[in-house]
Amino acid sequence: MADTLIHDPNGGIPRLLEIMRRLRDPQTGCPWDIEQDFDSIAPYTIEEAYEVADAIARKDMADLEGELGDLLLQTVYHTAMGEEAGHFTFETVTRAISDKMVARHPHVFGDESRDKSAEQQTADWEVIKARERGGQSRTLDGVAVGLPALTRAVKLQKRAARVGFDWPDTTHVLDKIIEEAGELIEARDTLTQDEVTEEFGDLMFVMTNLARHLGVDPEAAVRGTNAKFIRRFNAVEDALATRGRTPAQSDLAEMDALWDQAKAAKKIPD
């Protein structure tokens, strides 16, 4: 029966769960899969989430389909290990998230009115989440350490802002950016590398705060800038190639001029 399910293209989630059970079987499974644990698989989970985001950014729906499958496999992997250790199962995980979604959307699944803005619904969501964290005594408890640093900074700042620890407008944030930039320059000239690193972190944290006040996702903003940099630098390389040279055979002045051309060219959108 198990073999029939494994080779059934319409087997759905039960098929995927059975495949994972077979891969993890201590006697007949895959040696690599058997050796894995939560810690060793976690980096792959993070990587797959980023690959999903990358496919979305590229608007590649065919690739997104495959990447979503890879991400789903990560959930199946972790739940299989959880089941083996007696912690949880795929069924209890899906039950927990279903219960959470129902509880967090009383305006859809309960008797609350849907006649409110998305902004109000977001505020209500945060209230519900705070209630769920009832056992946590400190405002910043529970913000995942493994998040990308800029994303975690935003979440920490939002938590602090909910209890009134926040600048009232961007003017104060910009003043703080100037202050932190000055401290970084001073550190560069007079302090140790560790202190320079600390001051740079302070500046990045305040820059993230500015992004939050402006309604900008800093991770998305930097991803967009990375993509723009790649487009422009590729254009510089292409232009050099038409001249029979590589960047290593060029100099900064020439490449900077080609960069400005790429920046101005309509064929390279920003």
Image: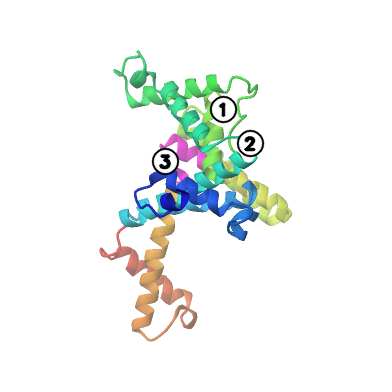
Of 173 and 142, nearer the camera is 142
Give the CA separation, mark 2 to mark 3: 42 Å
Q: Which of marks 1 and 2 is nearer the N terminus?
A: 2
* Residue for point 56% across, 27% down: 160
Q: Is mark 1 on a helix, strand or loop?
A: helix
> On the picture, is 118 further left or further right than 136?
left
Q: Point out residue 218 in the picture as x, y percentages from the top left corner.
A: 46, 45
Q: Point out residue 144 in the picture as x, y percentages from the top left corner.
A: 59, 37
Q: Point out residue 140 in the picture as x, y percentages from the top left corner.
A: 61, 29
Determine which residue is flagged by label 1. 160
Give the CA separation, mark 1 to mark 3: 18 Å
Q: What span is colored magenta in the figure?
A: 208-219
Of 122 and 32, nearer the camera is 32
> On the picture, is 34 further left or further right than 21?
right
Q: Is residue 182 above or below residue 135?
A: below
Determine which residue is flagged by label 2. 86
Q: In this view, does 8 lie above or below 247?
A: above
Q: Label 2 near label 1: C-beta < 8 Å? A: no
Give the CA separation, mark 1 to mark 2: 37 Å
Determine which residue is flagged by label 3. 216
Q: How crowded is mark 2: few (under 14 residues within 10 Å), some or many (20 or more)?
A: few
Give the residue at the far bottom of this rendering. Answer: 244
